[in-house]
């Protein structure tokens, strides 16, 4: 018999069907057994009257929580059943099969509150849960998070495909340390060394020199940074795009705000209520345009309103503290969750950002709920200027292959990189370890 998802089973009253999934809980008493079965779509109570099914009793005695079983039976309405008002009654004969028995679980996925009869049990810490991430991911909350992420990425894709963007897949093994020259992972590559791409930056720009005009890529990004914050990981998923024939970095900002608004609308429609219930976070579809402020003005505002003083060493860049405070500021000033920050110092930005006549990089950071989710810019596409800017950062030899992209004709262009894991984490109000499928950090290479 074909397997029916639990969400569909609930529409099959009176029919004999088969459901398969994890045992969410089992109550096995003398006369009756109640199993709550969970699959990716929902939960269903299976009620076994033992007298009617003596052949199932030895199996029922074996079943543990989180075991995987298959049950064939008939769905009937029963007002006494709290779960959906339905229960499944197994068919006669061998209607229950144990597919896999689970050992006692090594982690506590959710806090168990104390009752009069027994003390409460604390939830395991995040690092312990990551050790057994596949078990941790079975919770409704975690599965919801990945359903929402899937929706988000699908909506980003959909928006861009409708606007003639091509999807590219650039190499992650590259021959030279790239970008800002900041920490990259070196890997053995036969008899020499290669590096893991810290961004698809060079290749998305190469696509502009290839005349692709509009491209995006969703793929892994590697950063050899020893950061131990709730926002940093050594490998994450980047959603990057690049497009040609822009007149200013403002065109890039416009594209991004429209893209994100579309994606958040899709997530809200599909999962807004569930996210609110599971994580206590409202999915807010932002209004257009997003607020914009220069870095200098932002610091003035933060100082005047909240007494924030910028450490001298951090001048020209956005500090983590200021990033967090900017959320309060943008909410109080605009009632908006997003903030574009522009006019960083050239010294603090990548060499490939175009600069204006005063040397100001033509780019931005986008901050959502107090965390940077994007860097974007118009790129310098004029070979001589770009070469000089790379030389200024001591990178001209390293990026020679990249500079060549600009020698044989290249349209003006710009783009941005969005951290998918950061969006998911902010959407659910979690830290990065809790919101990645599997977190990677300086001390974490397993599972
Ligand atoms: P940037 O280095 O700012 O820009 O990265 C783009 C976005 O990626 C996310 N991000 C991270 N997420 C988790 N852990 C990290 N360690 C981490 N580092 C970055 C953030 C960030 O905004 N080439 C440029 C993009 C461009 O100009 O198109 C770049 O890589 O959300």
Image (spheres, rainbow, N blue to C red):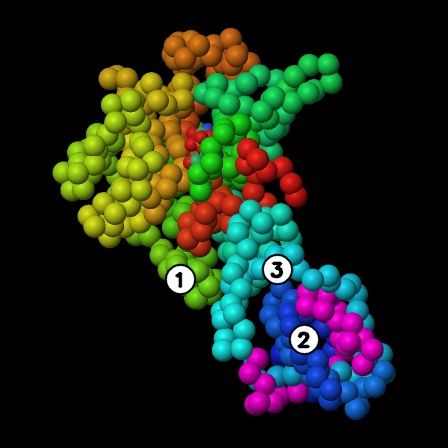
Tag 2 or tag 1, which sits nearer the N-term? 2
Image region (quadrant) for ligand 1: top left
Expressed as whole percent of the image width and height from the top left, the position of residue 198 reads 53, 28
> Which residue is label 3 attached to?
138
> Which residue is label 2 attached to?
26
Quadrant showing the N terminus: bottom right
Q: Nearer the viewer, residue 198 or 249?
A: 198
Can residue 221 be seen at all in this image of the molecule?
no
Q: CA distance from mark 3 to mark 2?
A: 16 Å
Task: Note whether 67 is above or below 221 in the view shown.
Answer: below
Can residue 375 be seen at all in this image of the molecule?
yes
Label 3: element kind:
loop
> Which residue is label 1 attached to?
280
**Residue 76 is covered by the magenta coloring:** yes
Task: Note whether 370 is above or below 298 in the view shown.
Answer: below
Expressed as whole percent of the image width and height from the top left, the position of residue 228 reads 47, 36
Label 2: element kind:
strand
């Amino acid at each position: 018999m074909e397997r029916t998802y639990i969400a569909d089973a609930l529409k099959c009253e009176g029919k004999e069907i088969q459901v398969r999934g994890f045992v969410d809980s089992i109550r096995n008493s003398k006369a009756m057994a109640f199993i709550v079965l969970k699959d990716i779509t929902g939960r269903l109570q299976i009620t076994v009257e033992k007298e009617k099914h003596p052949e199932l009793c030895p199996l029922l005695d074996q079943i543990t929580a989180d075991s995987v079983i298959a049950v064939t039976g008939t769905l009937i309405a029963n007002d006494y059943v709290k779960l959906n008002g339905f229960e499944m009654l197994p068919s006669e004969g061998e209607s229950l099969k144990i597919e896999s028995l689970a050992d006692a679980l090594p982690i506590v996925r959710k806090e168990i509150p104390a009752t009069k009869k027994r003390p409460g049990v604390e939830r395991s810490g995040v690092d312990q849960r990551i050790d057994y991430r596949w078990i941790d991911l079975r919770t409704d909350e975690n599965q919801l998070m990945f359903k929402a992420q899937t929706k988000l990425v699908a909506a980003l894709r959909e928006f861009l495909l409708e606007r003639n963007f091509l999807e590219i897949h650039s190499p992650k093994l590259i021959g030279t340390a790239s970008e800002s020259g900041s920490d990259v992972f070196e890997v053995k590559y036969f008899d020499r060394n290669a590096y893991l791409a810290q961004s698809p930056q060079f290749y998305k720009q190469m696509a502009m020199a290839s005349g692709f005009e509009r491209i995006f890529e969703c793929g892994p990004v590697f950063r050899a940074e020893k950061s131990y914050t709730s926002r940093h990981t050594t490998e994450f998923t980047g959603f990057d795009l690049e497009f040609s024939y822009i007149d200013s970095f403002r065109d890039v900002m416009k594209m991004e705000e429209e893209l994100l608004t579309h994606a958040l609308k899709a997530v809200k429609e599909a999962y807004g209520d569930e996210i609110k219930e599971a994580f206590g976070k409202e999915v807010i579809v932002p209004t257009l345009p997003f607020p914009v402020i220069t870095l200098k003005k932002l610091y003035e505002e933060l100082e005047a309103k909240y007494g924030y003083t910028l450490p001298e060493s951090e001048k020209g860049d956005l500090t983590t503290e200021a990033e967090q405070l900017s959320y309060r500021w943008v909410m109080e000033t605009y009632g908006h969750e997003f903030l574009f920050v522009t006019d960083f110092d050239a010294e603090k930005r990548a060499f490939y950002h175009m600069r204006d006549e005063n040397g100001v990089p033509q780019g931005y950071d986008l901050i959502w709920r107090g965390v940077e989710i994007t860097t974007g810019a118009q790129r310098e596409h004029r070979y001589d200027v770009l070469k000089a800017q790379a030389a200024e950062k001591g990178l001209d030899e390293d990026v020679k292959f990249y500079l060549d992209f600009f020698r044989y004709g290249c349209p003006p262009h710009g783009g941005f990189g969005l951290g998918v894991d950061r969006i998911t984490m902010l959407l659910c109000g979690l830290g990065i370890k809790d919101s990645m499928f599997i977190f990677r950090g300086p001390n974490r290479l397993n599972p």
